[in-house]
Image (tube, rainbow, N blue to C red):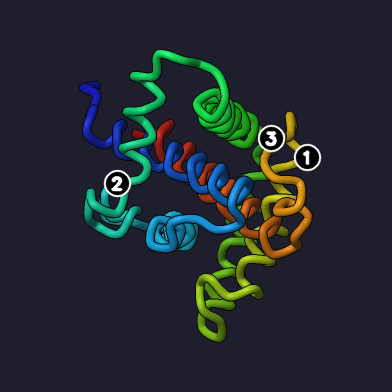
Amino acid sequence: MAKNYYDITLALAGICQSARLVQQLAHQGHCDADALHVSLNSIIDMNPSSTLAVFGGSEANLRVGLETLLGVLNASSRQGLNAELTRYTLSLMVLERKLSSAKGALDTLGNRINGLQRQLEHFDLQSETLMSAMAAIYVDVISPLGPRIQVTGSPAVLQSPQVQAKVRATLLAGIRAAVLWHQV
């Protein structure tokens, strides 16, 4: 079967976008709002028409991810923030493999995401309620698969429950992109 490198690149950019958003959240307490919306929305869309549709139908929606992917691949230094991005990206891929081999976890994940879709009828995608619900899915379904992703950043920022929820929700979006990456 022929590989579709365009779709593979889009999915990999989705993983990298989540990694970069996690890094921004952990260090600054905020991140690119548009990129976050695209990443979080990718969790909800269970039956996209194409790989690009997962990310809102436009390559521009993956700008942060594509730039991050390019930066990680072209980096002359594997230290500091670049090492963090590489670690987050690879950790998401490892967790996706563990998820794929855990049938019960996959079923639970699907059921919990369906619950998110019902909550979207009442709450905005980036509301605290939905962020907390997505974070809970990550904690309950993905974290037990191990190894846990050690997020590093500003201790003062990482103590905030809202930032913690956003980080975990964004990691869940990274898992979604990693599942897609493995499918294409």
Image quarter (top left, top right, bottom left or bottom right) of the C terminus: top left
Name above or below for residue 182 compared with residue 37.
above
Between discs 2 and 1, the one toward the N terminus: 2
Q: Which of marks 3 and 1 is in front?
A: 3
Element class at badge 2 = helix
Q: Which residue lies furthest to the bottom in this view?
A: 122
* In this view, 169 is above or below 117: above
Mark 1 burial class by Cα count in 10 Å: few <14, some 14-19, many 20+: few
Instruction: Determine which residue is flagged by label 3.
Output: 149
Cα separation between marks 3 and 1: 11 Å
Which amino acid type corresponds to the residue marked 2 in the rendered image? Arg
The residue depicted at 29 percent of the width and 54 percent of the height is 61
The amino acid pointed to by label 1 is Pro
- The spot of residue 63 in percent (x, y) is 29, 46
Q: Position of residue 44 (x, y in %)?
A: 47, 62
Q: Is mark 1 on a helix, strand or loop?
A: helix
Residues 58 and 141: in front is: 58
The N terminus is located in which quarter?
top left
Query: How many numbered discs?
Result: 3
- The residue that mark 1 highlights is 144
Mark 1 or mark 3, which is nearer the start of the sequence? Answer: 1
Give coordinates of residue 53: x percent, y percent. Answer: 28, 55
Residue denoted by label 2: 63
Q: Quadrant of residue 68?
A: top left
Image side of residue 182 versus residue 81, left or right: left
Q: Residue at x 52, y 31 (%)?
A: 85
